[in-house]
C-alpha cells in the first residue's frame, strides 16, 4: 500500500515533454517573406504537487512562451503534455475545460489582467461560469477566497481601481484559486510590486501552498525571490533548457557558465540573441 502511495506522490502532476514552439516571423529588408523562429526548443519539465518550480533566464529566453504552452494558452509546435498521467496534448473540449480549471495563471500586471469595469465578486466568479460550476454559494465562495488572500471580504463590491497593486494581485490570485486548481503558473506575478509588498505576496503564495498543496510554476527575473520561493529551478537560454535541479543544487553549484553568469548578476552578453529578440518584438508590435 505504502509503495502505491509513494508512487503516486512521486508521479508528476504535469509533465511537459520536448516542447517546441516556432513562430513565423516576417523577414526584414527589401525581400519580404517569412522565416521560422524557434522560441522554445525541446523543453521538458515536470511539476509536482506541493512544489514550486522556478523558470529563470534572460529576457527573451522563452520562459513565457513555455508557460503559455503549459497552460494551453498557446499551441505547441511539437512535444507532449501529460496531466496526472493523462495525455492532454490534443485534449478534447471536455478534458480541456477540466484542464483549464486545474491549471490557472496569475499574470504580471494585476490591473491589466482584471476588468476595470467589473466588481471584485464578478471578477473572482467569472472562471466558475466558464467551468459551468453550478450549485456553488457564490457569496460564500467570494468571502472565503478574499479572506484566504488577506483581503477584506466586505470589499467584494469594489472595482480594481479602488485597490493598491499588491491588493489587486491578491484579487488575481483569488480568481485563480476560485476553480480549485492544482497548478498555478505565476508569470512575473510579483515583479511589478514594491519589494515589501512582493514579500507579502510571496508569503501568501507559500501559505496557500502549504494549506492546499498547489504546484507552482514561478517565473521571475529576481533570483533572490526565486531562491526564497522555489524548490526546483530550471534555467533557459535561447529557448533551450540549459540546467535543471533543486534550488540548492542550481544556486550553490551551477554547472553551466550561463547559469553562473546569471547568478553572479553579471549581465549576460549575448548580442546576437538580443538583436533577434528586439527584431521579433518589433514585428509583433506591427
Ligand atoms: N507571437 C510571437 N511571434 C513571434 N515571436 C514571438 C512571439 N511570442 C514570443 N516571441 C519571441 O519568442 C522569444 C521568447 O519570448 P518569451 O516572451 O517567451 O521570452 P521571456 O523569456 O518570457 O522574456 P521576458 O523575460 O522578457 O518576459 C522572444 O524572442 C520573442 O520575441
Ligand atoms: Mg516573459
Image: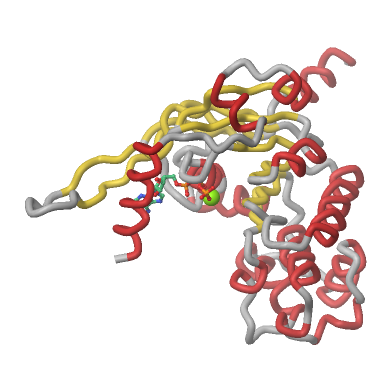
Q: Work out whether 258 lies above or below 197.
A: above
Quadrant position of the N terminus in the picture: top right
Asked which quadrant contains residue 15, the reply is: top right
Q: Residue furthest top?
A: 3
* Image location (x, y in percent) of residue 85: 62, 29
Query: What's the image's color scheme?
Result: secondary structure
Q: Is residue 269 left or right of residue 116?
A: left
Which of the pair 273/130 is nearer the observer? 273
Which of the pair 211/242 is nearer the observer? 242
* Image location (x, y in percent) of residue 248: 78, 23
- Say which residue appears at 84% left-offset and 13% top-offset: 3
Q: Is residue 233 visible?
A: yes
- Say which residue appears at 73% left-offset and 62% top-offset: 193
Q: Work out whether 185 lies above or below 78.
A: below
* Image location (x, y in percent) of residue 166: 79, 67
Q: Work out whether 79 lies above or below 125.
A: above
Amino acid at each position: 500500500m505504502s509503495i502505491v502511495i509513494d508512487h503516486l506522490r512521486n508521479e508528476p502532476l504535469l509533465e511537459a515533454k520536448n516542447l517546441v514552439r516556432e513562430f513565423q516571423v516576417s523577414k526584414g529588408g527589401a525581400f519580404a517573406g517569412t522565416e521560422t523562429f524557434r522560441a522554445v526548443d525541446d523543453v521538458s519539465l515536470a511539476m509536482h504537487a506541493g512544489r514550486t518550480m522556478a523558470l529563470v533566464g534572460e529576457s527573451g529566453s522563452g520562459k513565457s512562451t513555455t508557460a503559455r504552452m503549459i497552460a494551453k494558452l498557446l499551441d505547441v509546435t511539437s512535444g507532449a503534455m501529460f496531466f496526472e498521467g493523462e495525455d492532454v496534448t490534443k485534449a478534447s473540449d471536455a478534458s480541456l475545460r477540466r484542464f483549464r480549471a486545474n491549471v490557472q495563471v496569475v499574470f504580471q500586471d494585476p490591473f491589466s489582467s482584471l476588468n476595470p469595469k467589473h466588481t471584485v465578486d464578478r471578477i473572482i466568479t467569472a472562471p466558475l461560469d466558464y467551468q459551468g460550476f453550478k450549485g456553488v454559494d457564490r457569496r460564500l465562495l467570494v468571502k472565503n477566497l478574499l479572506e484566504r488572500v488577506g483581503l477584506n471580504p466586505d470589499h467584494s463590491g469594489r472595482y480594481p481601481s479602488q485597490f493598491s497593486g499588491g491588493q489587486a494581485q491578491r484579487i488575481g490570485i483569488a480568481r485563480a484559486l476560485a476553480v480549485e486548481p492544482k497548478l498555478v503558473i505565476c508569470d512575473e506575478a510579483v515583479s511589478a510590486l514594491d519589494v515589501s509588498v512582493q514579500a507579502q505576496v510571496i508569503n501568501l503564495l507559500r501559505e496557500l501552498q502549504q494549506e492546499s498543496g498547489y504546484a507552482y510554476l514561478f517565473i521571475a527575473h529576481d533570483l533572490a525571490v526565486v531562491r526564497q520561493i522555489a524548490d526546483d529551478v530550471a534555467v533557459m537560454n535561447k529557448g533551450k533548457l540549459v540546467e535543471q535541479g533543486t534550488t540548492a543544487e542550481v544556486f550553490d553549484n551551477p554547472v553551466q557558465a550561463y547559469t553562473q553568469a546569471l547568478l553572479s548578476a553579471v549581465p549576460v552578453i549575448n548580442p546576437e540573441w538580443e538583436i533577434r529578440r528586439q527584431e521579433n518584438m518589433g514585428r509583433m508590435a506591427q
